[in-house]
Amino acid sequence: MNMDEQRHAIRDELESLKAKGARRQELSLHACKRLFFDLGIRPSMAAVRDLTQTGSASDIPKDIDAFWERIREVSRVKVGAGSIPKALEDRAGELLGALFEEAVSLAQSNLNDEREEFRAQVAAADQRVREVQIRLEASEDAIRRSELRAEAASERAHALESQLSSVTSHGTAHQEGLQATVRRLDQENAALRQRLDAEQGNNATLRDRIDSLHLELRQSTEHYAQQIKDAVAEAERRVKPMLVELDSLRSMAATYQSGVRDASRKEFDFIQQIAAAKARGDRLDAQLREQSDELDALTKEIDALRGQQGIDPGIATLLCTLVEAGRLNPDELSAIGTAADGHVALPPRCPKCEEGEPELSYVDHRFELQCPECDHSSGLGESRLAAVSQFLSTGSVTASS
């Protein structure tokens, strides 16, 4: 039978005693007997309370003291039955007292050392978290500066679009000037595209840096959380043998009842300190998990924004306007690709029948725009922009013919 099964059997016995009307003292005494004699575990307030599910923080220690008192009474009878000289009995008592004081001093010293080490590890973890947050803020500032430069380029594109509209309104009399202006605008547009590609490259570098910082923060969080758990487990492992030795000394030192009671109270305070340290470690672990969840949410938000950073909205609007006006040829549409698909709006009506609402389909990694009323289709295109351009150009040709 393993430890869990034995604990379950003890709980069943206690439940049967409760059903028979047993009081709290009897339940606590039975739990202490089974823990000490059957499982070899020192009765503590937490262990007894876990088995009996009754009693307060002040009542259970009294019941444990009563259990030890009964053990001492039995031990006193056994020791008294022998013929031990008085001098030897006094010398043995002094030796047991000295061993007890030395064990308490060593346990306190080890506890203080481990507590300082734990505080140093927590401080180092906090420092690493602050450094990562500072680097993350610097990366976000760089991304904002890049977005401001992209907005400036968008405003320039809008200004060029306005100039192009004013030149177009002058008619055929200024055709040569219009062509020269279009060439100049194309050159400026190419320059803007190059600048935009450079900015996008910088943004990609910054995003990669942010991802690496996120990964480093997660790894540091997991590492320090594991160190905290290992430190708590190591403290428990070191304390348990000392508690067992302390219990054996208590059973032998029958003449030092008042000293044992003080040691029990000190032990209870020591257990409370360990529980407080565990609670603090759990709080730190919860804080680290919350920070990790916040970073994951920011990462998801950045990934959602990446899909819209392929091209500037102003440039995408200009491309859509040129497509509606039939100014882009198939080679230019192929060069643009799917970069502006996130900003392309479908035409509300079919240009052929002017009644149907076009529907977009995606077949074999290609796009097709088709009218459900007149079956007018754009054919397969490499992008949404190309499909819209083919749909509008085919419809206008059919209508004019």
Image: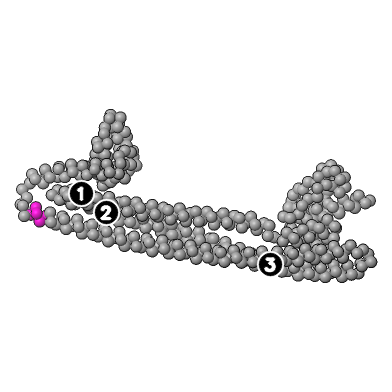
Which SS class for mark 3?
helix
Q: Earlier in the sequence, mark 3 or mark 2?
A: 3
Can residue 34 be seen at all in this image of the molecule? Answer: no
Which SS class for mark 1?
helix
The range drawn in magenta is: 88-92
Task: From the image, give the main secondary structure of the stretch colored magenta.
Answer: helix
Q: Residue at x 90, y 50 (%)?
A: 398
In percent of width and height, residue 51 lies at: 32, 40
Q: Residue at x 14, y 45 (%)?
A: 75
Which SS class for mark 2?
helix
Residue under circle 1?
Answer: 261
Mark 2 crowd level (few <14, some 14–19, many ≥20, 10 Å Cα): few
Can residue 267 be seen at all in this image of the molecule? Answer: yes
In percent of width and height, residue 207 lies at: 61, 63
Residue 355 lies left or right of residue 61; in this view the side is: right
For residue 87, what is the image quadrant? bottom left
Residue under circle 3?
Answer: 149
Would you say residue 212 sits in the magenta stretch? no
- Amino acid type at mark 2: Pro
Q: Nearer the viewer, mark 1 or mark 2?
A: 1
Residue under circle 2?
Answer: 241
